[in-house]
Amino acid sequence: MENKEEAPKKKKLLPFILLAVVAVGGFFGVKAYMYSQHHISTDDAQLEANISPVLPRVSGYVNEIRFDENQRVKKGEVIITLDERDLKIKCDQAKAAVESANASVLVAKANIVSATATVAAVKANMEAATVRLWRATQDYGRYEKLLAEKSITQQSFDAARAEKESAEAQMELVKKQSEASQSQADALQQQVILADAAVKQRQADLDFSNLQLSYATITAPQSGVISKKTVQPGQFVQAGQALFTVVNDSDIWVVANFKETQVADMKPGTAVDVSIDAFKDRVIKAYVCSFSPATGARFSLLPPDNATGNFVKVVQRVPVKIRLKTDADKDLLSKLKPGLSVNVTVNIDEVVSGVKTN
């Protein structure tokens, strides 16, 4: 009898239970729908940072390594030194070449002084030859008249004519000497210009040698933590060979790959909540910084070509750079590592003011 009485009661409660379940489900469904109208989320996101590979600019043997794996360094700190003896010898050779070139300039300038004196002497000889030629010409004219009047002998006239012809020949010789001395002076002037150019070239070689010598001391390109060490003391390294990397963990941001249908309502400065998988229930406030100029597929090794005839439409992803706010949890920020996965939620109705958005 009791079982028969409980059965109708259960049947009467069942609709109320179903109604309650539907009401609760509807409440959360509506809440989720309303939330989605103002928030955009993705789990295709990770932390990024500047990771600088350190490459030597000159080849040589490693003399000293001043760091350990995962050690923190400061920008400009000396971390590796190479054997610089060969480079110092090249610097000494370049310095000697500069001194030799400077000596050549002095010699060329001394030759210029000598050539200038020669030109002056030739000029004086030309003036003397000009006076001699004038006098011989005047004497020849007078003797020619006197010979016509039979006032002098033929011998005297011949002597005057010989003097005139000798003066003319002397004048031609002095002219040629003047031209030659002037040409030599011009050539020596060009030699001075060439010697000066040689000095500049040798000085450039010396500067380059000193620059190469400075490359034997390798410094940290930025502050951060050293990782991926692949060098040992005494090892011969080639210029351009990767030795290690420096991770700048003091400046970390997020790159979130949103679907192309999600970015229409986003803009720089939009507020973002970042949840990091490695630290459950920890949320960092952030904001949208900038958008990639192209989708991720465009930057792939083999970008898809929709003109090949086998087109299949795929929703593209747009990389969005998200900056963490500087007033966020300092303890949590210090634990972040590039590459960690994060969940990103963008609040399209909230804009953060006074932040850097480029």
Image: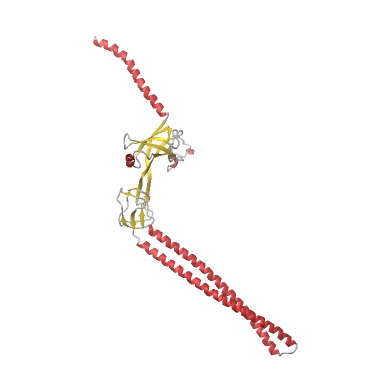
Which quarter of the rendering shows the N terminus?
A: top left
Residue occupying the far top of the picture: 1
Relative to residue 136, is residue 11 drawn left or right? Answer: left
Residue 6: percent from left, percent from top: 27, 12
Relative to residue 32, is residue 139 drawn left or right? Answer: right
Which of the pair 241/134 is nearer the observer? Answer: 134
Relative to 244, residue 97 above or below: below
Residue 319 seen in render: no
Residue occupying the far left of the picture: 1
Query: Image point 41% across, 65% down: which residue?
Result: 95
Relative to 70, residue 210 above or below: below
Relative to 189, residue 31 above or below: above
Residue 28 seen in render: yes
Residue 112: percent from left, percent from top: 52, 72
Rendered image quadrant of residue 25: top left
Which quarter of the rendering shows the C terminus?
A: top left
Rendered image quadrant of residue 237: bottom left
Query: Image point 64% across, 83% down: which residue?
Result: 166
Relative to residue 156, is residue 68 drawn left or right? Answer: left
Query: Image point 35% across, 62% down: which residue?
Result: 85
Residue 350: percent from left, percent from top: 42, 33
Relative to 295, residue 129 above or below: below
Residue 196: percent from left, percent from top: 49, 66
Name the image colouring: secondary structure
